[in-house]
């Protein structure tokens, strides 16, 4: 990606080409409105329902921040098909992709999702409140001390609601919604606070000539702000705070000055004025663009001027014209295409474009799997008495979070959830720490997220096993505590407990452990004998390996999360468990650069690296566990479509995914070679011949710290793989297939790494993967075109000067996925072999493992 002067490019504009806008989906029966995004600012909009135009020529205004929500003449009915189009400067787009109206109870059988007051908190004298997590077209209202103070019928997903009268101090505020007379749970309750003091000033985003929309920042939730243009009052607006967009007419001119102040209570003075000066057209920057890959039919912008028209050129030809954050294209992108993205403000055309090359594989950001908010969350402490484990008496206790009628301790179980049958349960186990610290409370954020989406989340108190030395006995005691807690909830479920009686589905049990607890959760499935309890899935976070389990996770879905900067479990032992895990139906490893051991637990406050390495913030650690953990449990326990996050097909929002490297495999894949067959380097797992040519030499080696065939000290896993070296350019390795395959709808997965040899050259390395047709031709795709090989995360300086006397930098392979369509240029193509070619100058040794052909 690069910023390129527009004048150096021969961009062919087509003023008649306009992208269709997009409808915010899904749409549900009884919705009174639809929301349209991606249209050109100031376009007019049409909506048709079942081929009948029901809204014609509606002014769209600016599509930011939340699109244009248009009220329908009649509520939608399930089965109807809705589309939208835009008109701009005499041209008309095609109709948008059709959206079929659904019955919301199919997706939300326990009622609409819980509205969220966003942003929060709310303040005395507040005049407007934002409500998020709404179904498009639903009704939303606000209450203060249970009296309605604001309402919008036919709301957008994030709706501002004016409040009349303004809030008083210490009022209890909630949001409510309904669709088809089906009520949601109420939002979390907030008590109005005194406004912040001192009252903050307002700042402006950069303003450019030709624009008509201002972005004001630093606003207080519920404030009113007054805006002036060149000293002339433009009016007063209510705001829900943080950021507010205001559209003005006429367009801005260079040098104009805008100022704004905000106020809350009538007797309080306004804030100091904030000012913004209009910059010339020549200062208008190129927008920033998210990843694009072959097959994409839209581009996503990550930074742009809110009211800019966005024009997209593919190989110099205009292919999209709309607005951020998403512009639809008139044809799908192809590997190697050059994409230029330009923003325009009225008559001001940017002097630069953002230029990027389309990759074969570059996963999109696809939302945050941790933010599914359906229910209030109740919580309680539990006490299951005592248990005896290997001669030690231990107390069975901890905390539990669950879907409830309202938020808070001891609340009744959610009635509508209970009516739909028992729900899954997850048990969490912490590791070793100071026994005075309530370590089991450190995952409350994760427990609450699971409870909001309909999973009971238990955290087991294990402090009585702390500070007794790391041993298999210690791990087994922790496992016994987890099993005793499972039995306690089994008894509550069977014994008519007023909260949990009949509401726990023990055939859908998940486990999560951290550190010593992360090995204990591997012991539990191997030792538990409770009838009716089925362990479906296990997360092992930064685990130790004291030899307490078989070391071969099996019979359940396995995920390990490994912090690369772990200053406690320095050897990242979870890699050993991943290497030996059986996919059931999958296994996944999340290796996280700049993450330490402790910051996943809120009670563990110290940086275990002792400041020896740059570390992500605690919030960024929590987002990793929340995103990948929620995706994991939603897939395995709730049947939601979140598996793509675990298999690298999509990226979670709000996570530093540039620090995350995944490994994964599936049980229904065709394994070409995993090197575990004991048949040598010249035969693969299909029993077919492998061959080396062009100066490449390959050996089978143990990717571990032990064993006669281990390659070097940089491998910390527990598997067999291949290390390839080459003395000549384009050294090649070939795996023959047992029969020709067609790659339509398939992908090639291979786990690969740059072998760390004690030095880290400044340039990254890589390879090419080729598919050989039955006629002998080879189609090559470079590893850089599917994500590339990362540099090893350096531990050398830290480990040699801090706690450890040896270099703990690791060769940690990641899985690269090569979509079949990047090789399959014709439907009839058949492939008889897979190849790698080491084509880099000064090629370094590369490690390979787990070559698979996978259904897409």
Image (spheres, rainbow, N blue to C red):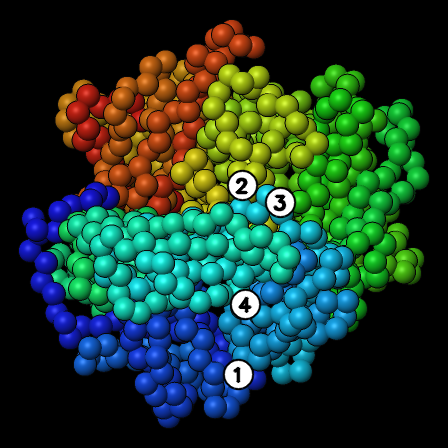
Label 2: which residue?
A: 624
Q: Callout 2: helix, strand or loop? A: helix
Compare marks 2 and 1 and give the one earlier in the sequence: 1
In the picture, the quarter occupied by the N terminus is top left
The Cα atoms of the two marked residues, 4 and 3, are separated by 24 Å
Compare marks 3 and 2 and give the one earlier in the sequence: 3
Compare marks 1 and 3 and give the one earlier in the sequence: 1
Q: Callout 4: helix, strand or loop? A: strand
Q: Classify residue 672 as left or right of residue 286.
A: right
CB contact under 8 Å: marks 2 and 4: no
Disc sitting over residue 197 in the figure: 3
Compare marks 1 and 4 and give the one earlier in the sequence: 1
- Where in the figure is residue 450, as x and y percent of width and height? 66, 52
Q: Nearer the viewer, mark 2 or mark 1?
A: 1
Compare marks 4 and 3 and give the one earlier in the sequence: 4
Which image quarter: residue 842? top left
- Where in the figure is residue 59, as x and y percent of width and height? 34, 79
Q: Callout 1: helix, strand or loop? A: loop
The Cα atoms of the two marked residues, 1 and 4, are separated by 16 Å
Disc sitting over residue 362 in the figure: none
**Residue 53 visible, this orientation:** yes
Q: Nearer the viewer, residue 231 or 166?
A: 231
Q: Nearer the viewer, mark 1 or mark 3?
A: 3
The Cα atoms of the two marked residues, 3 and 2, are separated by 34 Å
**Residue 733 visible, this orientation:** no
Residue 250 lies, with reference to residue 550, above or below; the image says below
Label 1: which residue?
A: 32
Label 4: which residue?
A: 160
Which image quarter: residue 111? bottom right
Residue at (51%, 91%) from the top-left corner?
A: 74
Residue 474 lies, with reference to residue 533, above or below; the image says above
């Amino acid at each position: 990606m690069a910023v390129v002067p527009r004048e150096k490019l021969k961009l062919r504009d087509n003023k008649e080409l306009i992208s269709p806008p997009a409808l915010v989906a899904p749409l549900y029966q009884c919705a009174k409105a639809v929301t349209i995004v991606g249209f050109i600012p100031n376009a007019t909009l049409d909506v048709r329902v079942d081929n009948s135009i029901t809204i014609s020529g509606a002014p769209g205004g600016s599509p930011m921040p939340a699109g244009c929500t248009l009220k329908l003449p009649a509520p939608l009915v399930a089965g109807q098909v809705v589309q939208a189009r835009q008109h701009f400067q005499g041209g008309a787009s095609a109709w948008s992709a059709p959206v079929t109206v659904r019955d919301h109870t199919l997706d939300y059988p326990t009622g609409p999702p819980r509205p969220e007051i966003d942003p929060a908190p709310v303040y005395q004298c507040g005049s407007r409140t934002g409500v998020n997590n709404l179904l498009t077209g639903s009704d939303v209202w606000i209450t203060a001390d249970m009296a309605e103070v604001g309402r919008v019928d036919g709301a957008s997903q994030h709706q501002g609601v004016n409040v009349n009268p303004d809030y008083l101090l210490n009022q209890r505020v909630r949001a409510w919604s309904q669709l088809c007379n089906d009520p949601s749970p109420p939002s979390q309750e907030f008590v109005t606070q005194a406004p912040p003091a001192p009252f903050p000033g307002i700042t402006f985003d950069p303003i450019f000539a030709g624009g008509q929309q201002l972005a004001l920042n630093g606003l207080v939730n519920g404030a009113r702000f007054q805006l002036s243009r060149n000293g002339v009052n433009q009016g007063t607006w209510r705001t829900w705070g943080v950021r507010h967009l205001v559209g003005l007419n006429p367009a801005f001119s260079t040098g104009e000055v805008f100022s704004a102040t905000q106020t809350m209570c009538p007797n309080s003075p306004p804030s100091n004025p904030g000012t913004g000066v209009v910059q010339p057209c020549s200062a208008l920057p190129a927008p920033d663009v998210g990843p694009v890959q072959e097959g994409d039919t839209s581009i996503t912008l990550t930074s742009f001027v809110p009211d800019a028209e966005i024009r997209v050129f593919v190989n110099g030809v205009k292919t999209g014209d709309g607005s951020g954050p998403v512009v639809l294209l008139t044809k799908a992108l192809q590997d190697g295409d050059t994409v230029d993205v330009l923003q325009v403000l009225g008559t001001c055309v940017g002097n630069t474009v953002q230029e990027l090359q389309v990759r074969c594989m570059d996963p999109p950001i696809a939302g945050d799997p941790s933010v599914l908010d359906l229910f209030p969350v109740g919580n309680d402490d539990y006490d299951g008495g005592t248990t005896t484990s290997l001669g030690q008496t231990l107390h069975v206790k901890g905390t539990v979070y669950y879907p409830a009628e309202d938020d808070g301790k001891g609340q009744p179980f959610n009635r509508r959830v209970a009516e739909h049958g028992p729900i899954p349960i997850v048990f969490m186990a912490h590791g070793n720490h100071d026994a005075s610290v309530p370590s089991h409370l450190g995952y409350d954020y994760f427990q609450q997220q699971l409870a909001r989406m309909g999973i009971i989340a238990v955290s087991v108190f294990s402090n009585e096993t702390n500070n007794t030395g790391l041993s298999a006995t210690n791990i087994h005691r922790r496992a016994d505590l987890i099993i005793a807690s499972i039995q306690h909830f089994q008894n509550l479920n069977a014994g008519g407990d007023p909260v949990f009686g009949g509401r726990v589905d023990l055939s859908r049990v998940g486990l999560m452990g951290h550190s010593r607890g992360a090995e204990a959760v591997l012991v539990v499935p191997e030792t538990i004998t409770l009838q009716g309890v089925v362990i479906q899935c296990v997360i092992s976070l930064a685990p130790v390996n004291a030899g307490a389990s078989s070391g071969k996770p099996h019979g359940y879905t396995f995920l390990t999360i490994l912090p690369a900067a772990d200053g406690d479990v320095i050897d990242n032992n979870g890699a050993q468990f991943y290497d030996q895990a059986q996919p059931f139906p999958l296994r996944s490893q999340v290796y996280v650069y700049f993450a330490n051991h402790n910051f996943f637990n809120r009670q563990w406050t110290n940086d275990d690296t002792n400041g020896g390495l740059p570390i992500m913030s605690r919030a960024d650690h929590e987002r990793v566990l929340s995103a990948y953990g929620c995706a994991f449990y939603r897939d395995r326990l709730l049947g939601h479509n979140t598996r793509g996050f675990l298999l690298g097909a999509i990226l979670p929002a709000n996570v530093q995914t540039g620090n995350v490297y995944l490994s994964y495999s599936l049980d229904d894949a065709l394994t070409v070679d995993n090197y575990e067959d004991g048949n040598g380097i010249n035969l693969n797992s299909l029993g077919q011949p492998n061959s080396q040519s062009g100066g490449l030499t390959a050996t089978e080696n143990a990717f571990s710290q032990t064993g006669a065939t281990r390659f070097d000290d940089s491998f910390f896993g527990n598997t067999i793989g291949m290390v390839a070296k080459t003395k000549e350019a384009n050294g090649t390795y070939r795996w023959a297939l047992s029969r020709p395959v067609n790659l339509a709808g398939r992908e090639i997965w291979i786990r690969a790494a740059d072998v760390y040899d004690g030095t880290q050259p400044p340039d990254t390395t890589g390879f090419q993967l080729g598919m050989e047709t039955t006629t002998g031709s080879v189609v090559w795709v470079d590893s850089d075109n599917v994500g590339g090989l990362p540099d090893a995360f350096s531990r050398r300086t830290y480990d040699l000067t801090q706690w450890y006397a040896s270099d703990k930098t690791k060769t940690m392979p990641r899985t690269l996925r090569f979509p079949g369509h990047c090789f399959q240029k014709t439907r009839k193509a058949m492939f008889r072999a897979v190849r790698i070619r080491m084509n880099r100058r000064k090629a370094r040794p590369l490690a390979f493992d787990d070559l698979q052909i996978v259904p897409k």
